[in-house]
Image: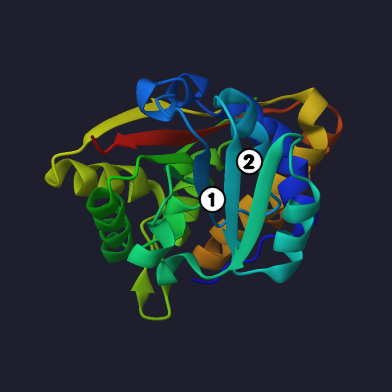
Amino acid sequence: MTGEFSTDWLLLREPADAAARATELAGLDDLARYDGRIVVRDLGCGTGSMMRWLAPLLPGPQHWILQDRDPALLSYAQQHVPEGVSAEIAELDVTALGDQHLAGVSLVTCSALLDLFTAEEVTALADLCVASRTPALFTLSVAGEVTLDPPHPLDEQVTAAFNDHQRRQSGQRWLLGPEAVGATAEAFAKAGVSVTTRPSPWHLGAQQAPLILQWLRGWVAAAAEQRPDLELDGYLAARSAAAGAGELTVTVGHQDLLACTD
């Protein structure tokens, strides 16, 4: 699986991610039942933001296996492990995950990742978790819902174009985009596993203007790539000016999913 996630971008979004995740899922019994050390495998860990959010919510001693395909991100994550938590790194693409990688693992996690999977890949991931009886907590998957205030006549077209871009063909792979959580939930449910989902939207305002500006550039660029006919330079300029002035609020829909395997 490929992807472009810079350290700067991931660190910029980390506070918004932490505020958005559905904390109640981390408090469910399946994540708090371990008497000994909890071993968490974090897929596509990036800078380690999931670890820094979740580790304080889990009981007892913890060991994290930080998995990513980007050695620079792994290096940052390894250098920013929360106090009292041990960690190791694993340079591995998430699509290369196998049975051996879940041996002894108490929990599988990922954040802002499922929408980059295909239907076949989320089914394979669910099957691995079920076969190893490993609970899974997958957070911040794109839900395809964006609201900007004040509104603009092009908002709906840009949102639709972005969502289509998320569902695009990448090489021989068709990405799930906004359908990722539904497909993942279905894959677990077919295996007889209990699934809980919760909304986890970003709510961004004037205090998050730098994040809004960076998000706008990526969001509009993806929409423009999908729909060159929209000519979005003026739209981006107007929206960026409003954000820079603290006059734009943005809600970006995400979903979190917990699959309990017992």
Q: Is residue 76 above or below residue 261?
A: below
Q: Are marks 1 and 2 in contact (CB under 8 Å)?
A: yes
Seen in the image, is 72 located left or right of residue 258? right
Q: Is residue 27 above or below residue 53?
A: above
Give left or right: position of 102 versus 47. left
Q: Which residue is mark 2?
A: 51
- The crowding category of the residue bearing disc 1, from other C-alpha atoms within 10 Å (few below 14, some 14 to 19, many at least 20), is many
Residue on which the image places disc 1:
42
- Crowd tier of the residue under label 2, counting other residues whose Cα lies within 10 Å: few below 14, some 14–19, many 20 or above: many
Place of residue 226 in the rendered image (x, y in percent of width and height, measured from the top left)? 50, 64
Where does the image place residue 19, in percent across and percent down from the top left?
64, 25
Query: Is residue 218 visible to us here?
Result: yes
Residue under the image location 66 percent in, 68 percent down: 70
Q: Secondary structure at mark 2?
A: helix
> What's the amino acid at mark 2?
Met
From mark 1 to mark 2, how far is it between C-alphas? 8 Å
- Whichever of labels 1 and 2 marks the residue nearer the N terminus, that label is 1
- Residue at image position (79%, 46%) is 80
Q: Position of residue 77 (x, y in %)?
A: 73, 53
* Colour pattern: rainbow
Q: Residue 139: x, y in percent?
A: 48, 39
Relative to 196, does residue 123 appear above or below in the rendering? below
In the rendered structure, which amino acid carries the disc numbered 1? Asp
Rendered residue at 76%/66% (across/down): 72
Secondary element under disc 1, as helix, strand or loop, is strand
